Amino acid sequence: MKHKMLYFTVLGALICLVLISLGGGFWGAEKSIGHWTGNMFRGVCHQLPDRSFMFNDVQMAVNSRCFGIFSGLLSGWILIAAAVFLMNKKYPILWFLLLAVIIQIIDYSGNLFQLWENTNHSRAVLGWVLGLAASLAVFDQFQTDNKSTKL
Amino acid sequence: MNEEEIKQEENFSFNDYWPSVGIVGTIFSLISFVVGLFFGYQQINSEPTGSFFSPIMLSGVVVCLVTAVAGLLAVWHFTREVSPKLKLGQGAIIGFLTGAVIVVISVILNELWIMLIDPEYTQKIMDSTIANIEAMDMPDSAKDDMIDAMADSMETGQSFFRQIFWGIPVTGLLNLITGLLGVKFFAEKEETF
């Protein structure tokens, strides 16, 4: 595996990102909005209570879709360690990423134009798929040269 | 070009990164600032509908998505203008720095707007958002919780340095990852013999 230092640095950062996104409930506080965990995501997430999961009866610091994306990024990043050793064929990873982006757009637009109503769980799952695909898309960059793949 | 020259070319300094980071970061912070203002004033000037899909919510989603791809484009710019060969770690640095630049310039532009153009902007946004929450079809206790949470958020998150301190890690990390994608998409592969 190449770039081990980068891999483990980003892994640590993503673990922190997910733990902080759990919000005040994980850190012993009674709220997330107004807490340092909520402030951290204020610029990237609307943090609407009805669109967020609860952790220890406290609203998380991010909405369900953002939490899905962050946990998907972490899951994908962990899977990179296995993928660099196991995947040495031409896997359609970029198509998977493109598909995940398109599904997000369709899901968001459908809900916006009231064609259907998505739920916290559906938003989290689709977000997770997008995060997973984004992380896995760079797995070949960590492979030693004799295993590098191209699309 | 001999092997030593290629190696020298691949050891970039921060001065090599700044043009791409600065240009892309500035463009994206301007976009996010303008989009934020557009949706902000749309929110201020709209009648409260009670819908969760307020202009401010749309603004958050659009700004988040737009700023997250800046790392990818900064790496693209670097491969076009500085060197087509780029290591993965260098792409990560470019991505992270681009995210940091976006946060810093966006906060400065917002502060300038409030200081020089519309000092009541934040208050108007808050009033309009509260009016929208009050029109929502939900129990009063839930409405009060939302309004309290929003007031808390406004009070604790307003200082200039606090916005930068809290903003850089998350935006930087998201752009770092898109910077890695940029290396995959745009950087030349090293030749192996």
Image (spheres, rainbow, N blue to C red):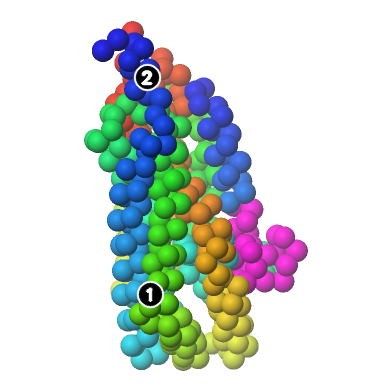
CA gap, disc 1 to disc 2? 44 Å
| Residue type at the position of mark 2 | Gln
Q: Measured from the top left, where is residue A42 in percent x and y?
A: 52, 66
Res A133 quadrant in image? top left
Magenta range is A18-38
Residue at (45% x, 58% y) in the render: B104
Quickly name the residue at label 2: B8
Hey, what amino acid is under mark 1? Trp
Considering the whole magenta stretch, tell me its main secondary structure. Answer: loop
Image coordinates of residue B133 in percent, x first then y, are: 49, 86
Within 10 Å of disc 2 (Cα), the crowding (few <14, some 14-19, many 20+) is few
What's the residue at 40%, 90% (across, down)?
B48
Residue under pointer 1: B113
Closer-to-camera residue (B92/B5): B5
Task: Say if B191 sits above or below B143 in the image.
Answer: above
Placement of B5 over or under B129, stated as above or below: above
Kindly identify the residue that appears in the image at 54 percent across and 39 percent down: A10
